[in-house]
Image (cartoon, rainbow, N blue to C red):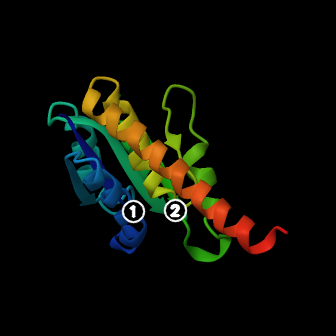
C-alpha cells in the first residue's frame, strides 16, 4: 500500500495534525510526518514534494496556519493529490488560513478541508487509497455503519430524556 505524507508548517500545528495521524493509524495506512515550512524551509518542502511519488506516496496532507502557503507550495511541485488543512492561529480564527489554502490558481488544485479538519483530510486520503485497496473500502463501510449507530444511540438517549 502506498503511504500518505503529512507535512506541517510548524510543530505548533501538531495538535491538529495528530487527529489525521490517529485516523491513518485506525485504518492501518502507512504515513510519514514532517515539519517543512513554505517560508522557512522552501527548498526542503520543494524537494520532498518533487520526490514524493517516486518515494512511494499516494497523497500529501499539508497543514498550516495564518498565511498557509504550504499546501499551495507543495501542490505546485507535485501532481499527487494535496489536501490542505487550514489551521486556526492568530487573530482571525483560521479564516486567513482557509482562504490562503482554498484560493488556488487553475491547474494547481488543493483539496481543502475545514479549519482544523485533520480527521477529514486523513479520511479523504483513505478514500483515495480505497479505490484500489478493497480492505480499506470495507473498513470505510464499517466506519460509516458504526458512526450511524452511534448517532442513532445518541438520538435514542436524547428522545428518552426530553420527549413525552
Regarding residue 69, the answer to whether it shows in the image is: no
Regarding residue 2, the answer to whether it shows in the image is: yes
Residue to which mark 2 is pinned: 116
What is the number of callouts on the image?
A: 2
The label number, if any, that marks residue 28 in the structure image: none
106 versus 159 height, above or below: above
The answer to whether 96 appears left or right of 76 in the picture is: right
Q: Mark 1 and mark 2 in contact (Cβ < 8 Å)?
A: yes
Circle 2 SS class: loop
The quadrant in which residue 19 appears is: bottom left
Q: Position of residue 8 (x, y in %)?
A: 36, 60
Of the 4 image quadrants, the one containing the C terminus is bottom right
Residue to which mark 1 is pinned: 19
Q: In the image shown, does 11 or 43 lie closer to the viewer? A: 11
Alpha-carbon neighbours of circle 2 within 10 Å: few (<14), some, or many (≥20)?
A: many
Q: Position of residue 118 (x, y in %)?
A: 45, 57
| Residue beneath the point at 55% across and 72% down | 89
96 versus 3 height, above or below: below
| Residue beneath the point at 52% across and 62% down | 116
Q: In the image shown, does 107 or 13 lie closer to the viewer? A: 13
Q: Position of residue 10 (x, y in %)?
A: 36, 68
| Residue beneath the point at 82% across and 67% down | 163
| Residue beneath the point at 17% across and 34% down | 1
Amino acid at each position: 500500500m502506498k503511504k500518505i505524507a503529512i507535512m506541517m508548517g510548524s510543530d505548533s500545528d501538531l495538535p491538529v495534525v495528530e487527529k489525521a495521524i490517529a485516523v491513518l493509524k485506525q485504518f492501518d495506512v502507512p504515513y510519514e510526518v514532517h515539519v517543512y515550512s513554505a517560508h522557512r524551509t522552501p527548498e526542503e518542502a520543494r524537494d520532498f514534494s518533487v520526490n514524493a511519488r517516486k518515494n512511494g506516496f499516494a497523497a500529501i496532507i499539508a497543514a498550516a496556519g495564518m498565511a498557509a502557503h504550504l499546501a499551495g507550495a507543495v501542490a505546485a511541485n507535485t501532481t499527487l493529490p494535496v489536501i490542505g488543512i487550514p489551521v486556526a492561529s492568530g487573530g482571525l480564527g483560521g479564516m486567513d488560513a482557509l482562504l490562503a489554502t482554498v484560493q488556488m490558481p487553475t491547474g494547481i488544485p488543493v483539496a481543502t478541508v475545514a479549519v482544523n479538519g485533520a480527521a477529514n483530510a486523513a479520511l479523504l486520503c483513505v478514500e483515495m487509497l480505497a479505490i484500489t485497496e478493497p480492505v480499506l473500502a470495507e473498513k470505510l463501510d464499517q466506519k460509516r455503519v458504526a458512526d450511524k449507530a452511534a448517532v442513532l444511540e445518541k438520538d435514542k438517549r436524547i428522545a428518552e430524556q426530553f420527549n413525552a
